[in-house]
Image (cartoon, rainbow, N blue to C red):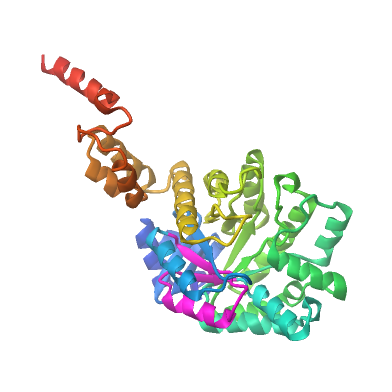
């Protein structure tokens, strides 16, 4: 296990690979792993680092729904996600043969795969027993172990939704209530059974499974706000405090931890939320879902989330979950998946420039020079989406190949270049 090796002062293969890719020394990376500020995910003998001083990573979600079950479509999405540069993928399938779908995604994926086991535990209980309230703790842990055996790299587990959190929610009701599917499953079970969340009550059991199969725990935000009207409220903060306590318990057992963060926040609360998480969770990597900074743009939530993601990353968030234009409307298709990945990658890159991550601003400097020289081939090569570059470049052809049709012969760069060069020559 990466954290255990780092504590012993051993430089692992994972640390070496991450250090090389991030242009850092192995000692720096190992120290961050030891502190819990960096986690290293493994998939098919490849390693990915997430955390402090590393490039901001992005995740893309795929998976079936009860209404759309097409495993070939999900694999097509997976390949597009990889092509366009997502660092990880999560399988959120809730329809069809969930075991078969997960195994196929893990088999086909070249990037680390995450899952949310409570989905399968809840759905199978409903199908087998007629209601989620009949789910047993053993069922939850059986599914977690099943995912672990299949080779999942990280799992979202809503351990911070407790009876105490529910009491907060009752005393301070929300407008948008609960939008986390995993959180909703667990809350329903807890309310009817009047029992504590098994993932919290038997957290030690969870840690034993995590140690046995060496996967990272992504402590899920079951109480994330689903609208900016509920941002940074008592329920959200109560859960975060619990996640801070569980983080230290996991670290004591050398289990790697990510903290998941709020989904909807007004722009002025994004930075403070990141600072708060880093303080309460002792610098553990922060995984944010967006954040979506306005609720009035369905169909454009890849943009609203990219705005929030860029700010969150700049303030220190380490891992951005993409949001597609389909968010709040439908299951995303291939086109929406691509748009989501590109938007999240732009947000992550913007954040990395702000954080001073090595090589980030240099990419832009190269583009600046190519654009000034009107070196279209170089611009295409440096573009985050060369295919869209080609599509737009060819949309309205120009007779003057060294400019574009926005300005044509009145290109500001070309005009200034001409007269400055003439002045210098004379």
Task: Identify which residue, 392 or 133, lies in the foreground.
Answer: 392
Indicate whether 204 appears above or below 424.
below
Residue range corresponding to the magenta coloring: 86-115
Which residue, as the protein is rendered here, is positioned at the far left?
A: 426
Residue 128 placed where, x, y %?
A: 73, 86
Residue 104 placed where, x, y %?
A: 47, 79
Indicate whether 26 appears above or below 127.
above
Q: In the shown orientation, is residue 17 left or right of residue 208?
A: left
Report if residue 337 lies within the magenta region. no
Task: Identify which residue, 169 or 292, lies in the foreground.
Answer: 292
Residue 295 placed where, x, y %?
A: 66, 45
Report if residue 110 lies within the magenta region. yes
Quadrant of the rendered image containing residue 160: bottom right
Q: In the shown orientation, is residue 240 left or right of residue 267?
A: right
Residue beneath the point at 77% across and 75% down: 201
Indicate whether 426 appears above or below 7.
above
Decide if residue 101 is in sight here. Answer: yes
Number of marks in picture: 0
Residue beneath the point at 85% across and 51% down: 172
Residue beneath the point at 49% across and 72% down: 2
Decide if residue 53 is in sight here. Answer: no
Name the quarter where the C terminus is drawn: top left
Quadrant of the rendered image containing residue 179: bottom right
Residue 14 placed where, x, y %?
A: 42, 70
Q: In the shown orientation, is residue 402 left or right of residue 250?
A: left
């Amino acid at each position: 296990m990466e954290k255990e090796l780092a504590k012993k002062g051993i430089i692992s293969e994972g640390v070496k690979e991450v250090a090389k890719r991030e242009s850092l020394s192995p000692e720096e990376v190992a120290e961050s792993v030891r502190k819990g500020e960096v986690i290293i995910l493994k998939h098919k003998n490849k390693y990915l680092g997430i955390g402090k001083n590393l490039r901001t990573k992005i995740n893309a979600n795929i998976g079936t729904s009860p209404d759309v079950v097409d495993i070939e479509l999900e694999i097509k999405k997976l390949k597009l996600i990889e092509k366009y540069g997502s660092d990880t993928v999560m399988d959120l399938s809730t329809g069809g043969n969930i075991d078969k779908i997960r195994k196929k995604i893990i088999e086909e994926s070249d990037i680390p795969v995450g899952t949310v086991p409570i989905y399968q535990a809840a759905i199978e209980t409903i199908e087998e027993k007629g209601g989620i309230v009949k789910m047993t703790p053993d069922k939850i842990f059986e599914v977690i172990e099943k995912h672990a055996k299949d080779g999942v790299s990280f799992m979202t587990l809503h351990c911070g939704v407790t009876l105490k959190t529910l009491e907060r929610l009752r005393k301070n009701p929300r407008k948008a209530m609960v939008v986390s599917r995993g959180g909703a499953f667990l809350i329903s079970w807890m309310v009817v059974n009047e029992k504590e969340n098994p993932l919290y009550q038997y957290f030690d059991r969870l840690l034993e499974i995590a140690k046995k199969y060496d996967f990272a725990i992504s402590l899920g935000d079951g109480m994330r706000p689903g609208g900016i009207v509920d941002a940074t409220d008592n329920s959200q903060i109560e859960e975060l405090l619990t996640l801070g306590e569980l983080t230290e318990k996991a670290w004591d057992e050398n289990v790697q931890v990510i903290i998941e963060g709020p989904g909807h926040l007004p722009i002025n609360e994004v930075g403070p939320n990141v600072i708060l998480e880093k303080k309460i969770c002792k610098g553990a990597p922060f995984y944010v879902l967006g954040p979506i900074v306005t609720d009035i743009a369905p169909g454009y939530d890849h943009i609203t989330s990219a705005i929030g993601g860029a700010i969150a990353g700049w303030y220190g968030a380490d891992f951005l979950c993409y949001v597609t234009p389909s968010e709040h409307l439908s299951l995303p298709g291939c086109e929406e998946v691509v748009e989501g990945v590109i938007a999240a990658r732009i947000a992550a890159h913007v954040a990395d420039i702000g954080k001073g991550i090595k090589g980030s601003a240099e990419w832009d400097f190269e583009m600046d020079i190519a654009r000034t020289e009107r070196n279209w081939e170089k611009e295409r090569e440096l573009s985050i989406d060369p295919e869209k570059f080609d599509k737009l470049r060819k949309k309205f052809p120009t007779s003057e190949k060294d400019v574009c049709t926005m300005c044509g012969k009145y290109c500001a760069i070309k005009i200034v270049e001409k007269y400055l060069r003439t002045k210098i020559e004379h």
